[in-house]
Amino acid sequence: MQFESTDISMTRSASDIVFEALRRAIVLGEMAHGTPLRQEEIARAFNVSRVPVREAIARLEHLGLVETRRYRGAVVAPLRAEDIEEIFDLRALVESDAIRRALPGLTGAELAEAEAAHDAFAASGDPARWIEQNRRFHRALYGIARQRHYMGVIDTMLNLSDRYLRTQLLLSGGHRIAVDEHRRILEACRAGDANAAAALVRAHVLDAKASLLERLGDPLANDRGTELPRPRESGRG
């Protein structure tokens, strides 16, 4: 496991920086499932004690990105089908209601922000950029300043789904399909049709779930909890 040596010994948010670096590496597939997270090695890479490393690993475990195994310690968690079902079903439920509630008060600035995120998402070929702009797109349409409690739940779900989103977008046609679905959501928002926007968001999230389960073999059909295979590292159009 390689990390660029970084001196953050004087930084108050050392745990946050270690957490984000590890989270990003896991989400982007730079650390495969089963990879051990050795505290001493990580602490050396960031020039910190093991305390912020332990804190960062605990937060990753809370997100389901890391799990503790007997005799091995903390390792990167596998992709699991039952997690996909739960996370994406909850996203579909909460996000469809959030956009329905937000749309009557959606401002021109919020719509412009969503449109800019859509354009950036469509133009990019970088999976890291896709994740960033997808989050920006969805948050802009949910009235983040007016629905703090909804956004707390949604941000948690987006954090949990980022890793799966990368996998889904790297599947054949996933990015192109997401671009088209985002476009249709924007059209409903421009028209002020809250019910249509809610239905499109729900379908968008559930389609992503179905694509993941179908393309990765859908172990739920016969063996719940079976680990999903790792995605191919090929890009898409």
Image (spheres, rainbow, N blue to C red):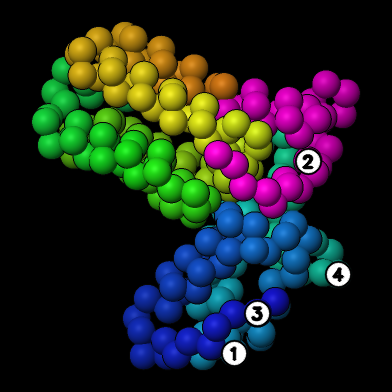
Image quarter in which the N terminus is found: bottom right
Which of the pair 149/176 is nearer the observer?
176
Q: Which secondary structure lies at badge 2?
A: loop
The furthest residue to the front? 237
Residue at numbered disc 2: 228
**What residue is at 87 percent from the left and 29 percent from the top?**
223
Q: Is residue 113 left or right of residue 13?
A: left
- The answer to whether the residue labelled 3 contacts the one labelled 2, judged by CB atoms less than 8 Å apart, is no
Residue 66 placement (x, y as % from top left): 66, 58
Tell me which secondary structure the magenta stretch mostly adopts.
loop
Which of the pair 57/112 is nearer the observer?
112
**What residue is at 55 percent from the left and 39 percent from the top?**
237
Q: CA distance from mark 4 to mark 2?
A: 23 Å
Q: Which residues are magenta?
A: 208-237
Residue 185: quadrant of the picture: top left
Q: Is residue 235 magenta?
A: yes
**Amino acid found under the numbered disc labelled 3:** Gln
> Which label is found at residue 220?
none
Residue at numbered disc 1: 44
User: Dot 3, how many residues are within 10 Å of its Cα: few (below 14), some (14-19), or many (20+)?
Assistant: few
* Residue 68 visible, this orientation: no
